[in-house]
């Protein structure tokens, strides 16, 4: 037979039991899609900081630049961190995604790399050059080549020129378009290749070894994107604010030695 003390303890246990699921449910789970390399590494540093704020960050890596936006739009992710604004704008326009930027992350200066030549001056006329086949990154590569005086593009092409927009090609280069993730693998077969920094790092290519390198300017700072319906939710603000902390900026500076730049 329960005395009053036993009854009080049992009742307290029941109350705690009833409240335990509610306490557990306070943790917000955020699945964030990233490309391999720096984006994933940086978010691994953000993860424990968010855990202190009752947000469980689950980092999901993708090997291309298309699926992370598809997964986000479909509700299979809560956020992604892998793209810049021109790329996101193009995806929204072409695919009708209801997603948008909520905060800036880091900048990855684009590079032209070669496993055969130590400088651009050594690249022979008529050589094959690999660039990314998506409109934003491929266009960015062409703009880099124009900026360095290698080619000339039509006036008014904006941020998404195509190979068809080349109006002058003095070295008679052959431009080969491949998936962005595959560009490091083309180095054995081409004179040089345009490679995004995250894929260069993932392939153990030192970003400072680029024979041509984009100036760290323009609209190419990367961003965190979420679904439009989620943009004003408290966890979004917490995610961005945590990414923008001095601890994360210090990590980026120390880990990447200027190859990846904080963009906030």
Image (cartoon, rainbow, N blue to C red):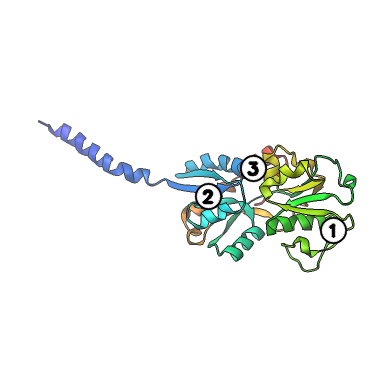
Q: Position of residue 17 (x, y in %)?
A: 27, 40
Q: Position of residue 34 (x, y in %)?
A: 58, 47
Residue 209: in sight, yes or no?
yes
Please identify the quarter of the rendering in which residue 19 is found: top left
Q: Position of residue 61 (x, y in %)?
A: 57, 44
Left or right, 148 with respect to 54, comes to: right
Residue placed most toward the observer, 61 or 147: 61
Residue placed most toward the observer, 254 or 206: 206
Camera-side mark, 1 or 3: 1
* Residue identifier under label 1: 151
Does label 1 or label 2 sit earlier along the sequence? 1
Camera-side mark, 1 or 2: 1
Q: Are there few (<14), some (14-19), or many (20+) residues within 10 Å of tag 2?
A: many
Give the residue at x 67% y 40%: 202
Does label 2 or label 3 sit earlier along the sequence? 3
Q: Are there few (<14), some (14-19), or many (20+) residues within 10 Å of tag 1?
A: some
Does label 1 or label 3 sit earlier along the sequence? 3
Above or below 59: residue 133: below
| Residue at disc 1, secondary structure | loop
Residue 225: in sight, yes or no?
no
| Residue at disc 2, secondary structure | helix
Q: Which mark is residue 239?
A: 2
Q: Are marks 1 and 2 in contact (CB under 8 Å)?
A: no
Give the residue at x 66% y 42%: 252
Q: Which mark is residue 134?
A: none
> Whole-Å distance between the Cαs marked 2 and 3?
17 Å
| Residue at disc 3, secondary structure | helix
* Residue identifier under label 3: 38
């Amino acid at each position: 037979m329960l005395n009053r003390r036993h009854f009080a303890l049992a009742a307290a246990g029941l109350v705690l039991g009833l409240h335990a699921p509610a306490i557990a449910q306070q943790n917000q789970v955020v699945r964030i899609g990233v490309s391999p390399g720096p984006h994933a590494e940086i978010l691994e540093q953000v993860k424990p900081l968010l855990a202190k704020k009752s947000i469980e960050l689950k980092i999901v890596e993708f090997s291309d630049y298309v699926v992370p936006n598809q997964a986000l739009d479909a509700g299979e992710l809560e956020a992604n961190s892998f793209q810049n604004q021109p790329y996101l704008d193009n995806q929204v326009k072409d695919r009708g995604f209801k997603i948008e930027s909520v905060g800036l992350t880091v900048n990855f200066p684009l590079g032209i790399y070669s496993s055969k030549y130590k400088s651009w001056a050594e690249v022979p006329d008529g050589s094959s050059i690999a660039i990314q086949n998506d409109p934003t990154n491929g266009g960015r590569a062409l703009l880099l080549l124009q900026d360095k005086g290698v080619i000339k593009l039509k006036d008014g092409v904006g941020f998404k020129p195509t190979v068809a927009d080349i109006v002058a090609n003095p070295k008679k280069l052959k431009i080969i378009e491949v998936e962005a993730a595959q560009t490091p693998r083309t180095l054995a077969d081409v004179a040089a290749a345009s490679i995004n920094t995250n894929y260069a790092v993932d392939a153990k290519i030192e970003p400072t070894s680029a024979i041509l390198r984009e100036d760290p300017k323009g609209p190419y700072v990367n961003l965190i994107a979420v679904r439009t319906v989620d943009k004003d939710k408290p966890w979004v603000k917490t995610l961005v604010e945590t990414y923008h902390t001095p601890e994360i900026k210090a990590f980026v500076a120390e880990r990447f030695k200027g190859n990846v730049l904080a963009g906030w």
